[in-house]
Image (cartoon, rainbow, N blue to C red):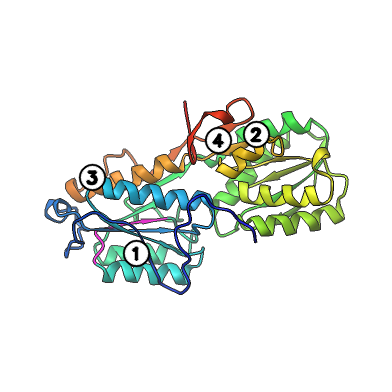
């Protein structure tokens, strides 16, 4: 695959390996800090940050922003990647426990499969703060901070109809089934597109949030449906892979493509007229806020938020506002 990133973290070559993302001058605290004691928090300590795959710019930004905020607040941090594998995730949680982390920021690998990992951290008195994706059980994590995927998908679906038109045939590229966000976005698209009976979905493929898979699945869909007029994708990486396949087939001019994430590559594609829009997820905002809530919990026993589950509205990005990016996944308001 030819996925591009803006800042590479590191290749995680073996199970359980972590990458040091940033560190302050203080050493990790010997205490777990799981009960929110002010003593461990006042000494800083290690915050373990577990993302999915930093080869994707979305998850790379998630880890980088969280690590930077941890440093600002006086903690050291390790950034590690599960690659969406629950066994790897479990081993990384073990490492966080062994290293006496005071808190864990986790992008869960699986909505159901990651419940055990959170329980394991809880048993070690280490508070867990989830970002980007939820788990299917409340009351385990101290906070679950995610994009408002339903709202974002509705925005994307409405813009997609404006660009494609109210009739024609289209295909859909879906994210990993283990991630609740995949179904939420697909259902959000459907809630809009189903209002137009002359728009017909003729095919869909799971491409697992991946650019190479998006390319390959798009080639397969094109062979079966060469006359489609639109592609709607669950994230930018799959959309960008589809765009490459459409270029190779000489069909990009007749097919409109919509994405979701607000990645730098997607913004460039919108500017170039190759992608009609992307829906920006405020990952830089909630990754930073998750660390702030961890800091608050360690010092006071409270996150400062009104609820465990917290959603952040997405922003539609088109040619009209694509020039307003002030950094990766950050748009001037």
Q: In the rendered structure, which disc, 4 or 2, sits on the residue that comes first in sequence?
A: 4
Between marks 2 and 1 in the image, the one whose residue lies nearer the viewer: 2
Asked whether residue 145 appears in the rendered view, the answer is yes
Q: In the rendered structure, which disc, 4 or 1, sits on the residue that comes first in sequence?
A: 1
**Numbered range of the magenta stretch:** 100-106
Task: Characterize the local packing of mark 3: few (<14), some (14-19) or many (20 or more) Cα atoms within 10 angstroms.
Answer: some
Per the image, the residue denoted by label 2 is: 271
Q: Does 103 appear above or below 330?
A: below
Per the image, the residue denoted by label 1 is: 119
Per the image, the residue denoted by label 3 is: 296
x, y percent for residue 10: 45, 62
Kind of element beneath mark 2: helix
x, y percent for residue 175: 62, 54
Between marks 3 and 2 in the image, the one whose residue lies nearer the viewer: 2
Q: Are marks 4 and 2 in contact (CB under 8 Å)?
A: no
User: Which residue corresponds to the image point at 31% horizontal and 66% vertical from the top-left?
Assistant: 96
x, y percent for residue 2: 64, 58
Give me the C-alpha separation between circle 4 and circle 2. Answer: 24 Å
């Amino acid at each position: 695959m030819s996925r591009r990133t803006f800042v590479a973290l590191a290749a995680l070559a073996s199970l359980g390996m972590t990458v040091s993302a940033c560190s302050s001058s203080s050493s990790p605290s010997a205490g777990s800090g799981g009960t929110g004691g002010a003593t461990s928090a006042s000494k800083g300590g290690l915050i373990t940050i577990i993302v999915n795959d930093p080869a994707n710019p979305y998850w790379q930004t998630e880890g980088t922003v969280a690590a930077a905020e941890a440093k600002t607040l006086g903690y050291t941090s390790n950034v590690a990647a599960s690659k969406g594998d629950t066994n790897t995730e479990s081993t990384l949680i073990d490492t966080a426990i062994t290293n006496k982390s005071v808190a864990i920021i986790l992008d869960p690998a699986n909505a159901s499969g990651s419940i055990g990992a959170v329980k394991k951290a809880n048993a070690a008195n280490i508070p867990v703060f989830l970002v980007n994706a939820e788990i299917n059980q409340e009351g385990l994590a101290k906070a679950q901070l995610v994009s408002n995927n339903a709202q974002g998908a509705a925005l994307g679906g409405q813009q997609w109809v404006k660009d494609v038109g109210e009739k024609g045939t289209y295909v859909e590229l879906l994210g990993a089934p283990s991630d609740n966000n995949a179904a939420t976005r697909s259902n959000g698209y459907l809630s809009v597109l189903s209002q137009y009976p002359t728009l017909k979905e003729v095919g869909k493929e799971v491409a697992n949030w991946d650019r190479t898979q998006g390319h390959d699945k798009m080639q397969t869909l094109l062979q079966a449906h060469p006359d489609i007029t639109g592609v709607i994708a669950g994230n930018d990486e799959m959309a960008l892979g589809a765009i490459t396949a459409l270029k190779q087939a000489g069909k990009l001019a007749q097919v409109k493509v919509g994405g979701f994430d607000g990645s730098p590559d997607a913004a460039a594609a919108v500017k170039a007229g190759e992608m009609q829009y992307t829906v920006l997820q405020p990952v830089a905002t909630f990754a930073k806020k998750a660390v702030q809530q961890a800091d608050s919990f360690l010092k006071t026993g409270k996150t400062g938020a009104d609820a465990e589950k917290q959603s952040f509205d997405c922003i539609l990005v088109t040619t009209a506002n694509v020039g307003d990016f002030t950094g990766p996944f950050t748009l001037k308001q």
